Image (spheres, helix red, strand yellow):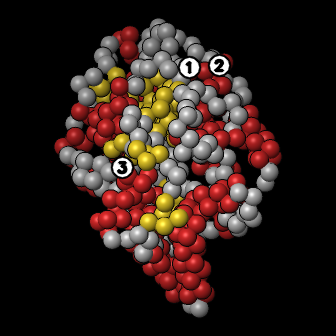
Amino acid sequence: MPDSEQCKVLQELVDKYTTSFPPFTPSASSSRARGEFNGIVVLLSGSTGVFGSNILAKLAASPFVKRTYAVSRPSVNGLTVHERHARAFRREGISEALLNDGNVRFLDGDFSMEGFGMEARVFAKLQSTVTHIIHNGWQVNFNVPVEKFEANFRSVRKLVDFALHSQVNDDRPAKLIFISSLGVFRCVDPSDPNKVWPEERLVKPNSALETGYTEAKWVSEQILSEAASHTALQPTVVRIGQLVGGPNGYWSEREWFAALIKSSIFLGMLPDLPEILSWNTAPVAAQALLDMLNSSEPYLHLVHPKPVGWNVIISIFSRKLRVPVVPLDAWADALEHSHELALSNASQKSGTQSREVMRKAMQQNPALRMLVLFTHGRTTSRSKKGGKRTAYDSNAARTLGEGTRCIFDTQRSELTPDWWG
């Protein structure tokens, strides 16, 4: 799809979710006025992921936060919300004692549903006590088109309405903080040191094109900016850069860099990328986010203040793993060949055997899960040189997303093809 047509699709999504914002009506009989709580009360989404679990840990330990409501989708494996968070804390190396603090409450809910899919009395309790909303939960899938993020857009809009109907402060709605991504600048040359990515609204979506994930983040940013323009809501969009491991160094191979490293061991080579890295650890980023809770800024970026070149980091891996660094095109070709080989092996089997072949291939070479993402750089570089675009352009990303049957994994908060394991 040409960029102009895709921009039109994105604007139509913005228009769909920015009609008829409710007015904010101050409540003189709010629970805040009655003194039920005296401090910050947070409604948090996405608190079982890497960043979310670290946010929850910082909130639980903060003397300024009197209560945190951690909301997760209903479990599909029988685990309670508390059990899922305990598992996430163990994974990250965070003390589970923080979860037993009486000021942390765990709730089943779905922000895309009316009343968050909760009992009416629970929803009313939230509206009468929550002072801050941190919306961190998001579908993490780089292989599906923006249209597959409708549930995320509904969640953003319903949280806007929730904040505007909050009954805590007499003079303003609940503060809404949306966790976005620096990926909205994905089509801006990251190697240009003179290019400053502005902490401001991106009116046009061009820089966010190519993946549904970044396009969806852009759409959500626009929903919040429109709400700020037409209501009393003062949201803050926090664009996050790459986050590395938690307190114990855990880094899931379902994330792009960890997948890249494991696949590079399998392929016997590491790629050279024109990247500038400004990464933070998840605990540091979570603490910084708490410092932003009462910010009046509409847009903020959470990145390391002293970035370094890709070669600085990747040369360490090359030396320790004894794997050479090669041009991106060579690495992407090897990854694509590995993908074709896995498909060929799977096609010789049938039914569950075929699925098992693909599952093992993905476990050994996890970058295959993100084939479109990893070959995008090659596609872009070739198109800039006037060369022929490979099959893995933005249209192929949409085709792959449509053609892969996916299941929603509530523990990882991501969409994963059913053979990924």
- Identify the residue under disc 3: 244
Does the rendering let one see residue 89? no
Tell whether 129 sits left or right of 151: left
Upstream in the sequence, badge 2 or badge 3? 2
The residues tagged by marks 3 and 1 sit, at their Cα atoms, a distance apart of 32 Å
Determine crowd level at label 3: few under 14, some 14-19, many 20+ residues with C-alpha closer than 10 A: many
270 or 24, nearer to the observer:
270
Where, by quadrant of the figure, is residue 1 drawn?
Answer: bottom right
Q: Nearer the viewer, mark 1 or mark 2?
A: 2
Residue 209 picture location, percent across and down:
67, 46
Q: Check the image and report above or below for 303 versus 243.
A: above
Q: Position of residue 119 (x, y in %)?
A: 47, 38
Q: CA distance from mark 2 to mark 3?
A: 35 Å
Residue 345 placement, left or right of 243: right
- The residue wearing badge 2 is 229
At label 1, which amino acid type do we have? Leu
- Residue type at numbered disc 2: Ser
Residue at mark 1 to residue at mark 2: CA–CA distance: 8 Å
Determine which quarter of the picture holds residue 307. Answer: top left
Circle 1 — which element?
Answer: loop
For label 1, the residue is: 233
> Which of marks 1 and 3 precedes in the sequence?
1
Q: Residue at x 65, y 19 (%)?
A: 229
Can residue 138 be seen here? The reply is: yes
Query: Mark 3: which amino acid?
Result: Val
267, 3: nearer the viewer: 267
Q: Secondary structure at mark 2?
A: helix
